[in-house]
Amino acid sequence: MLTIQSIAYEQTYPLRHEVLWPDKPIEYVQIDNDADGYHYGAFLADELVAVISLFIEPGEGGPVRARFRKFATRPDRQRQGIGTQLMNHVIAEARRLGAETLWCDARLDAADFYQRFGMEPYGEGFYKGAIPYNKFSLMLYPALNP
């Protein structure tokens, strides 16, 4: 049975490294403000198989935004619905924390996954190393039509 729970940010590092940037040193997957984020893990039989980190960006007079980063699912557990459940959890958490928009930098090879949740690309594409990315966002509280 799959369970999703809050985890310490340090617990995300091995899976982030293994899945996202195995050819880089582990420090490459550490984020300066990891201690300020919310980190979630998906567990199967007490084994961590997927991680995601959520950061709230205060609005400074505008809407509060949330950004998720370093979403990683163990390769042998991909395409089994685990990432979908974790993504649904993060969307609900972003709403609970008062965010009006949820966004991420997404690898283009994962674009279809994010679009299934209603996320839309915006801005110019870019590269991290040789990997193409684009920003994707989801309005959590769309403006009401007058």
Image (cartoon, rainbow, N blue to C red):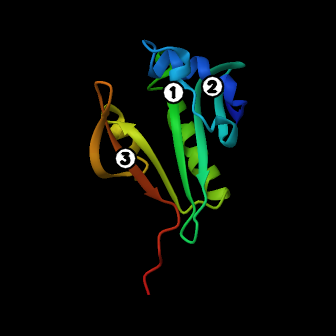
Where is residue 43? Give x, y as percent: 66, 25
Q: Nearer the viewer, residue 81 or 138?
A: 138
Residue 1 can be seen, yes or no: no
Up the image or down, 144 lies above or below 129; here it is below
Q: Answer whether labels 1 and 2 touch (C-beta < 8 Å).
A: yes
Measured as percent of width and height from the top left, residue 60 is found at: 58, 66
Figure label count = 3
How far apart are the two marked residues, 1 and 3, measured between alpha carbons? 17 Å
User: Residue 72: which numbered mark, if any?
Assistant: 1
Point out which mark residue 12 bears: 2
**Mark 1 vs 2, N-terminal side:** 2
Look at the numbered discs 3 and 2 and tell me whether their residues touch, using CB distance below 8 Å. Answer: no
Q: List x then y, in percent, for residue 101.
A: 50, 59
111 to the left or right of 76: left
Which x, y percent locates residue 65? 54, 58
Question: Mark 2 falls on what kind of element?
Answer: helix
Left/right of residue 110 with respect to residue 85 in the rendered view? left
Measured in 3D between alpha carbons, the distance from the residue under mark 1 to the one under mark 2, in whole angstroms, is 9 Å
